[in-house]
Amino acid sequence: MGGHRHRGCGVRTGAAVDHFASNQQVNILAPPVLGLLVWNLVVYVSLAIRAVMRMRRSVGIGPARRTVVWMGAAAGLFRRPSKSGNAIRREVLTRFARDWTALTAPLYAARAVRILHLAAAAVAIGVIAGLYMRGIAFEYRATWQSTFLGAETVRSIVAIGYAPGLWLMRMPVPDVSEIASLQLPPGENAAPWLHLMAATLLLVVVAPRLVLAVVAGVKEYFKASNLSVVITQPYFQRVLRGFHTGRARVEVLPYSVDLSTDGIANLEDLLARVLGGNVELTSLPAAQYGDEAPAADSWEPDDTDPLVVLHDLTVTPEQDVHGSFLATLAQNALSRRLMVFVDESSFSARIGAPERLARRRQLWTEFCAEYNMTPLFINLESPDLVAAEEKLDGILTATESRP
């Protein structure tokens, strides 16, 4: 995930920040070595404090990791939108970045930790490389300069700041006279001090950061392995329903209903909203009251396209007529996804009383429930497509989630 790029950038940064004076002197008190040591020690203390706090209560990610998380999740938003882009596309990208960030925040946080530790180690490696690369071509002299510090104080700083390197190289702490002699030109050959600085950076920065990066990498691996996207959620079900090549085919079988041109267009628009993309709607020959359901050989055995049975709300459902038709149809067209739509346009035009409309809806709902189905009520002549889309999406999601 770009780890090599981050490490390479860190090494180059470390080599760039390591610089010597034009008179080829190495100031043992000047950055970047002591600066890196102090900064990393501050980071380690901060990590320890956060670890203790995390054991007591939940602690959010820090600002550095939060920045990496945000950049990783929302990087696509910074791309210049094409001319075909519009407010809807920008809104979709924004919502996607927000939802995806919420889902993957733990993974991105672990990844941010790994990247930051590797980058810190790379900077230290770059500084070490810069020390040796420039020391090969030129002779550098170790010295120090300070307006406020004396030799004794500088010796204490060296004893504390370079203690890990002194321990690794088994070197004694220079005495005050040795430290004082470095202040006088031309100092001494800087080779021992370069080795001391490199050893200290290795022990204090490079080694701990690499260990922390490995630990973070293990956490990242397990978080990535356990990252689960529940595709049974309504959003993903809609995406899967819309994932098809070409046009989605839907057949509608009217039962004692006369479909107008506007009604067909509105029905096709609704199905396109829910199923995604273009919809090819085919109206089958209408069945009349008391007709038998189409025989099993009327359907292709491997055809899984949705089949809509359209009823009229003005008709009262009867078990021995409408129920028999629906049960036989479900048995004969076994591979089809069967849906029941009830057109309210004629009922609303003739009666229009809200209480009677509610009672008739309840009657059809109870009737369809006996066949484990949920009807969609829609006024095909003047539909509320937004509300109908929401209801149909809920019906399909509930149907798809059944075992």
Image: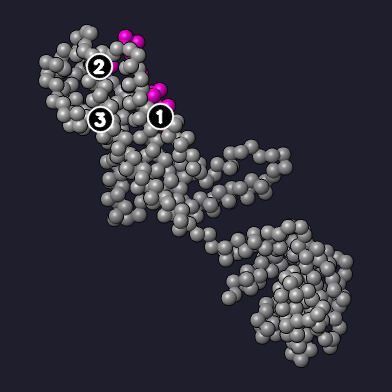
Give the spatial CA distance, label 1 vs label 2: 22 Å
Label 1, secondary structure: give it. helix
- Pointer 1 residue: 11
Q: Amino acid at mark 3?
A: Thr
- Pointer 2 residue: 190
Q: Amino acid at mark 2?
A: Ala
Give yes or no for residue 9 being in the magenta stretch.
Answer: no
Task: Give the image quarter of residue 374.
Answer: bottom right
The part of the chain drawn in magenta is 10-27
Label 2, secondary structure: give it. loop
Tell me if residue 352 can be seen.
no
393 sits left or right of 155 in the view: right
151 sits left or right of 354 in the view: left
Mark earlier in primary sequence (1, 3): 1
Q: Classify 10 Å Cα crowding around label 1: few (below 14), some (14-19), many (20 and above).
A: many
Mark earlier in primary sequence (2, 3): 2
Q: Amino acid at mark 1?
A: Val
Front residue of this view, candidates 279 and 98: 279
326 in relation to 170, above or below: below
Tell me if residue 367 can be seen.
yes
Give the spatial CA distance, label 1 vs label 3: 17 Å
- Which quadrant, please, contains the C terminus? bottom right
165 sits left or right of 236 in the view: left
Going 75% across and 81% down the picture, which residue do you hit?
332
Contact flag, marks 1 and 2 (Cβ < 8 Å): no
Residue 348 location in percent, x, y? 80, 75
Residue 354 location in percent, x, y? 73, 77
Residue 42 location in percent, x, y? 29, 36
- Pointer 3 residue: 200
Give yes or no for residue 15 being in the magenta stretch.
Answer: yes
